[in-house]
Image (tube, helix red, strand yellow):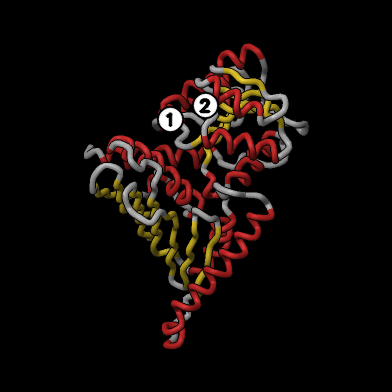
Amino acid sequence: MTRRTRTLRAAVVGAGLMGRWHARELTRLGHALVAVIDSSEKKARALAKEHDGAREFTTLSDALLNDSFDVVHICTPLDSHASLATQALEAGASVLVEKPLAADLATTQRLLDLASSKNLLLNPVHQFAFQQGVEQAGKNLPRLQGLLHVDFTACSAGAADQSDDEHERIALEILPHPLSLLARLLSSNNDDYEWKTLRMGKGEIRCLGAALGTAISLTISMHGRPTQNYIRLIGREGTIHADLFHGFGVTERGTVSKMRKILHPFTLSSATLLNAGHNLARRTIEQEQAYPGLRALMRAFYSALQGRKPPPLPPEQILFVARERDRLIKLLAGE
């Protein structure tokens, strides 16, 4: 991997919502956005105008003919990820790509092999694992004295008023989130996991699994309300609640008594309110308006490019997420 300490030159492919957030965060980290690429020239120009020195292009190939980049951020639909990542890597740029990194395990492996052969970094945006609440959960896991249950729930309005097929597409693209958290929090590999799936219509996914004595429940709903995104870790000596929309967590002790049972709704609510308030204040000061964990992931990614830290997501974790996503998609399809 190239080791640099200078300001890195970045291109963002996709001038939609996530492209704007990537552009904002990489420049906040002190790096230079020098190109914005979007099939809509109007969108590319609008985002480029917000960043001094950025030029607009309608294709990545055109941008690569006119300039060189240290990093390419891919913030486009899934079906374009593989071709865009290949172009960027072949041109000598490291790549940060919105999840899922690729459509399947085989393509993910091919892209990682290509990056490795060129001594470049390729990482998907699994930002949940870099939230302060999740990092604290990882530190507090030993206090649970054995992890019994992991419950993940995401209710999203990301496909509101769209077709059933669009609900299904987005639900499947959410799958890497809980899988990346399992890779972060559980010390196991894909061979340890057993899965069963339930279907309640398109855009509604329920996966039940087990690994190393831990029961796992993954619920993804495009119709459930209110919108929410959280993970709960239940152990023998306590429970950890992590709010993934807002990026904070609460750890409860497992002490049992009559008084604790009576006070539990109040103590949990109080701890949640306190931690949520601290988290909101921190995010306000740091101007982290949305997508908690994204800035921390990008900081780690750029630090790895400059040789100061290891890659934020090692290949084995990336492959784990791709492999388990493939398995779950097949099970959901009845294969």
Is residue 228 among what the camera can see?
yes
Question: Is 80 left or right of 330, judged from the image as shown?
Answer: right
Quadrant location of residue 300? Answer: top right
Residue at (33% x, 36% y) in the render: 166
Q: Position of residue 295 (x, y in %)?
A: 62, 44
Q: CA distance from mark 2 to mark 1?
A: 19 Å
Q: Residue at x 68, y 24 (%)?
A: 54
| SS of the residue under disc 1 | helix
Relative placement, left or right, of 271 versus 298 is left
Q: Secondary structure at mark 2?
A: helix
Q: Amino acid at mark 1?
A: Leu
Which residue is disc 2 drawn over?
113
Count of labels shown? 2
Q: Position of residue 147 (x, y in %)?
A: 44, 63
For label 1, the crowd category at 10 Å Cα-Cα, with few meaning under 14, some 14 to 19 and many 20 or more, is some
Q: Residue at x 56, y 64 (%)?
A: 276
Q: Quadrant of the N terminus?
A: top right
Discs 2, 1 touching: Cβ within 8 Å? no
- Nearest-to-viewer mark from 2 and 1: 1
Determine the residue positioned at 44% across, 57% down: 230
Mark 2 is on which residue type?
A: Asp
Which mark is first along the chain, 1 or 2? Answer: 1
Hey, which quadrant is residue 214 in on the image? bottom left
Residue 94 appears in the figure = no
Q: Which residue is mark 1?
A: 78
